[in-house]
Each structure stands twice: as C-alpha cells, then as structure tokens.
Amino acid sequence: MKILALTSIRSDYDLLSPLYSRLHNDIDIDLKLLVGGTHNSAVHGYTVNDIHRDGFDVLLEIDSLINSDTAKSRLKSASILLLSAVDAVAAFSPDLIIYAGDREDVMVGALLGGYLSIPTLHFYGGDHASDGYIDNPIRHAVSKLSTVHFVSTAVHKARLLALKEPSNRIFDLGSIALDKFKNIVPIAGVKDLIAGRIVDKPAALVIFHPIKDEVIQAPEIITNMLMTLIKNGYHCFIGSPNSDPGNATIVSTLSGLAAKYSEITLYGNLPRGEFLNLFSACNIIVGNSSAGLLESASIPIPCLNVGLRQRGRDCSDNVLFVDTSIEAIQAGLNEISSVEFALKMEGVTNIYGDGHSAEKAHKLIKSIDFKSLLNKPEDPLYV
C-alpha cells in the first residue's frame, strides 16, 4: 500500500508523527511525505531537518512559503504548493493521501485526492472554535472533500454527522498527538539546558500565535502575559509563532522583551524530545496554542488560554479561558493557584484520548477499503 502524507508546518507534523513511525516501519506500506510550507523556511527553523532525522522518506520538498507576513501570502503559498505537487503526486500514484487539521494546505491535499481520484484521509475533522475565523470553514470544507475521517472525540463525530457525512466514513479514535507523551526519553535539567543557566523558579511555557482580530493588539497582549507571569514569579519559556499574518510583530516584541528580562528564554523551535521534556517540566502553559487544549491535560498542567483564539473548542478541566488585560490574566493565575483548581487538577483526564491512537489508526488504515469509498454519491437531503 502506497501512502502519501502532506505536511506543511511543525504543528501538523507533530500531530501525526507517531502514526508516521508505525506506517514507516510496516513492511506492507510505502510511506512518503510531501513537505512544504514552513518546513523549508530558515525563518521558521528549517524543520524539514526534523523529518529527515526521524528517518522518513520524502517524496518532494517544495519551497512554497511566501514569507511576506500578509493574508494574501497564505493564499499564494497554498497555490504554489498545489501547482508544484500535482505532477509528483500523480506520478507516485498513492493508494491514500493523509493530512491533518485546518490550515489552508490541507485543502491542497483534499484537492489533489479529489481530482486525481485518490482516496483521502482527514485527521481532526469535526473540531470547531467559536471565533468565526477561516480555520473553521476550511476544516469543514476539507471534511466534505475527504474520503474518510479519523476524529478525536464523539462530539467531533457528531459534528461531521451534522455536516451530513455518513457514519461509515467516520472513526473516533482519539488524538494521535497524545501518543508522543507515552515515549518521552527524559532529559535531566532540561529547563537549565534550554535557558543556558539555572532556572530556580516555576516555569511557564508560553506560545502565542497571531489571529486576525488581535494582530494590532498582539504586542500589548504578549507584554501583558509576560509581565504578569514574571510578577508572579515565573520563568517564561517562549516558542516562535506560526507563519500567519502578524507573526513578525510578535517575534519583534518577544525579542525586545527577552533582551530586558532574564526571566524570559526564547527557544524558537526545539527538537521534539527537548520540547516534550520542557513541556512536561513546566508548571503551566499560557497563550493560545492548541497544545494547551489538546495536550496539556496529558501531563497534566494547567492551561491559561489568553484572548480569542481557541474559544469554544472542547477541552479538559485543566483549561481556563481569560481575556487579554493584565487584570484578567492575573485573575486567571489566581484561580489556577487556588485550592479548588488544584483539586480539579487531581482528577483531570484528557478528553482527547489515552495515548494509544496511533496504533488504532494504523490498524484501521490497513483494514478499510478506501477505494470502495472514493466516490461520494451521498445526497445531503437523505443522509
């Protein structure tokens, strides 16, 4: 069986990498990756190197990212990815194309499959945030274009059923992103290692990505988060934002603050093992990353989600949503430090799964007759 996996950013790669390992080690499967987007960008850490270090076979590396920090560049980058991939994908002629999430590049995977008559498998469909941004309709549109869906929760399955996707195309197996926490190789003193000095304070993992309605306010939001965390005695480990419009302003603000405060460590992009160790060693995750909603409950640590991004998404009891003012962030930190929240944390379970989803996905991929499901004749009036 020939499988092509499309990946264009560190986040979607990490969501599926435990499954890639299983597929790569299966002698009955020929797995190849189509690598584009931020993976091939030095600005974003040239993370294609991580893919090569993991030992996966790459069908094609595409320099598709236009790093102009605008909304137009997202569309142009996606069009470059599609145009550059068509002939190589047609020549490889895979039995299945897989992709994950809600960025514009998954639409490329769905279009490649649809027009080249190749079955497709969409991971993490049926999710939904109440923020009204383009990610939601892209995710749902890709679900309608895809052959089969591997979803993370029963609610996500119900949402796809509401979109009139037939139940025989939908499989609820949890989030593969959680599997990597089962096999962490411990790194002693990881906080000191990454900071380059002894960190004797509680640690906060801070990840903040730009969204359209907060681009102008982003410097203020970041400053509010970091100053409040430092005031409360935290050392802040901060990752790079994604490639969405507004990322350059965020990077500039972070660099300026890090130059002034020794309690701030900018780590940019880390190898997966170092990142997972750091994540697990931190006392809290703050910002607006999906890692807070999807993964932090598996450690578990509290997640303080700041601002509009991620609002309305399903999450475990360790997540608290707050506004962007200093007062709101401080109130959130106070609540997370309370006895009541500590009791809640003692019983927290991750609603997204148990860390064994890659095994389930691997077995399903080998058992499903994708070719028989390729055509989608279902009439939404009668599904």
Image (tube, rainbow, N blue to C red):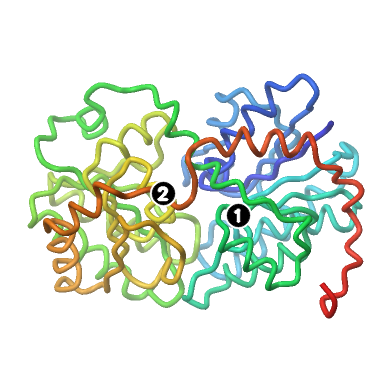
Q: Which residue is disc 1 drawn over?
A: 124
Measure how far apart labels 2 and 1 are at the Cα level: 16 Å
Query: Taking 23 as reference, is 15 above or below it?
Result: below
Q: Which residue is pictured at 36% across the width and 30% down the height?
A: 274
Q: Can you give x and y, in whole percent of width and height, for residue 293 in the image?
A: 40, 56
Q: Which residue is disc 2 drawn over?
A: 350
Q: Are circles 2 and 1 on residues that touch, CB within 8 Å?
A: no
Q: Amino acid at mark 2?
A: Asn
Q: Which residue is pictured at 62% across the width and 22% down the height?
A: 55
Q: Residue furthest bottom?
A: 381
Q: Which residue is pictured at 16% across the width and 61% down the height?
A: 333
Q: Quadrant of the N terminus?
A: top right
Q: Which residue is pictured at 25% across the width and 50% down the height?
A: 345
Q: Amino acid at mark 1?
A: Tyr
| Local SS, label 1 | loop
Tell me which numbered mark, 2 or 1, is placed earlier along the sequence.
1
